[in-house]
Amino acid sequence: MTPTINPYPELFSPIALGGTTLKNRLVALPAGTSLVQEGIPSHGDVEHVERLAAGGVGMIVGGATVVHPTTTLRSRKLVEAYQEAVIPATAEKVEAVHRHGSRLVTQLVHLGREFIGGESDSPPVAPSPVKTVRDAYPPHELTIGEIEDIVEGWRVSTENLVAAGVDGLEVHAAHGYLVAQFMSPLTNRRTDCFGGSFENRMRFGRMIVEAMRSAMPAGRILGVRLSGEEEIPGGMTIEDCLPIAEFYAGLGVDYLSITHGTRGAYVKDSTQPDAVAVPSASRVRAATGLTTLVGQRIRDAATAEHILKHGHADLVGMARALIADPELPNKSAQNRLLEIRGCLGVNQDCRAFDPHLHCAVNAEVGRGRHRQAGVRASETKDVYVIGGGPAGLEAARVAAERGHRVSVFDKDTALGGAVRVAAAAPHRSTVIDVIDYLGNEMRRLKVEVNLAAGIDADDFAEIRSIADHIVVATGSRPAPAPEWLDGHPTASVDEVIVDDPAGISVGEAVVVDDGDGFWPAYNAAESLAQRGWRVTLATPLTALCSRVPAESAGPLLRRLGDAGVRLRVAHAVAPGSDGRTPLLQPVFGGAATALDGSLIVWHGPRQPVLDLGALAGDDTIDVVGDCVTPRRIGHAIAEGYRAGCEI
């Protein structure tokens, strides 16, 4: 037998860190699950880290772990390491991780003036009473006694986690949280021994490292996470980060983890460049000589291998890519690249925490693995899937993995449905990755795919007579413009995203987001603006991008502003007194503007495509995805997954 050649020799080589050796250089970065009850990790949290370890990473850095009661949330969804009760649950996590040859490091944080979108019964605190733009209240300025008490919280938390057997700990000194707030002149305006000079601003960090080391046996790993660039006006840059990195190296920490950004902007979406923090990490590594970990929008083993081979870092971290597919390391090492379920970078489910971590493309995250997933069915069935969007393809994938004979039918000449339209929008091309992955799975699992094969009522009757089970996943279509706009130039968001409306020359356009607040209308506005249209986006909602993930909304609105798109909240497009002339009408009163000559791009709720007759009550038919009611990719994938498991 020919031995398997390691396609990524740098990435899958061991490295010594602290007093241990990691089996490879791929690290699961901190990503809290919120699978936590009263500050204690639940069994679901343990299962999550075990999936990561079984997938082949060398080290896992557990996040969302706080050190003091002054930084807990009312929901108690962050792990509270200062509680002694955290020890047994953490020990269970350590055992699960070690079982697969990986190592577990826990990141400790105090949020300071930031409360990550959750209410707290404690006031926000900071080195100085400088309010963050992200929260409503100015922080309380910490006294020296309060600072010392928080440092003691770091020591107690370390003691508890060491008792649980963790392999190491990481100080979260990035993303504008409390340690970073002390380091930055922007947020630290103190005049005592904790402010002013560089040495004074670093005193808090020094005290934390010393307190943690006092509670750590020799050989345990200690790291520090830093923002190479805070990416905010007046924030710290790489020139500020380098002396900070050298300071921590001088304290004897084992590694530095380099990232970019502050809260609300550090989880880079699909519009951001890949591997954005690598230049900063490279400079930190050169300046300190310390083992350096870099992450942030690194999505594949090839990128990680390049980073390591060129000496930019010693370890490469991934967060969302490993949520999307915990098996990414094993599949990469075995050169099974087409089987990797890629992260889309849309931040829709993984950043919502409603009520805990989910993933748009991996239905098992937050829900657990279905008991029949991957289990061969007791009876092999002929399964017909009508619709080649994400819901239908996921149902086909899971059913085929369970041994069923599966055929897919789609009316279009390419798989993807509405996802293919979304991927045509500016900066949104990565959403097609889920369709590419599922298409590859169809080939691997020998699913018969029939394109340009629309199923009408007669066809359905025939299929019903020969199939053992049918999955209906016919998707949705754009809502038509209101009848009163008949005779006026109109288009759907799908039409303008894919191309300019036929027969209409470039000019003025009004894109109407009729209450959705999600991507489609904004995609349409950006598409038109890029082609030279003068665009107004109007919505009756009182906020912009109200359902676009927070990390995406800011970059999106900046791009629209730079493109000259006029944004009108609390404005509806309605007929004038003649019942025909479209007016841009303020929702809460005021003068209306006539829209004669403007192209109206109407975006109302999409409509299900389901014209196959009455299906209710037939347990040999599943109806999934947008044809039930139009929603998001995550809903479609979850419903397709469940259907495939239960056939």
Image: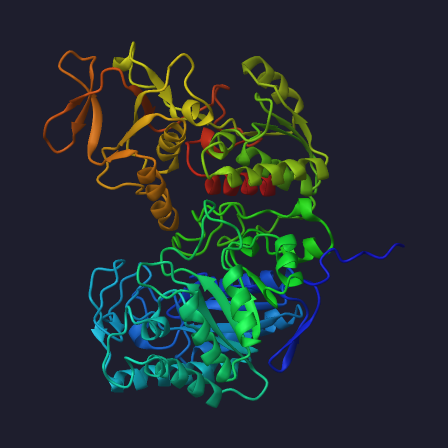
From the top left corner, tell me how far across and down residue 360 is, in percent: 49, 46
From the top left corner, tell me how far across and down residue 106 is, in percent: 49, 73
- Along the horizontal axis of the image, is 346 left or right of 220? left
Identify which residue is drawn at 44% across, 87% down.
210
From the top left corner, tell me how far across and down residue 131 is, in percent: 22, 65
Nearest to the observer: residue 378 or residue 601: 601
Identify which residue is drawn at 47% across, 25% down.
498
What is the quadrant of residue 178 in the picture?
bottom left
Nearest to the observer: residue 319 or residue 79: 319
Above or below: residue 236 compared with residue 618: below
Quarter of the image with the N terminus in it = bottom right
- Do we see residue 603 in this rendering? no
- Along the horizontal axis of the image, is 223 left or right of 520? right
What is the quadrant of residue 465 in the picture?
top right
Q: Which residue lies furthest to the right in this view?
A: 1
- Along the horizontal axis of the image, is 286 left or right of 549? right
Q: Residue furthest top?
A: 487
- Along the horizontal axis of the image, is 312 left or right of 136? right
Picture colour scheme: rainbow
Quarter of the image with the C terminus in it = top right
Above or below: residue 569 compared with residue 467: below
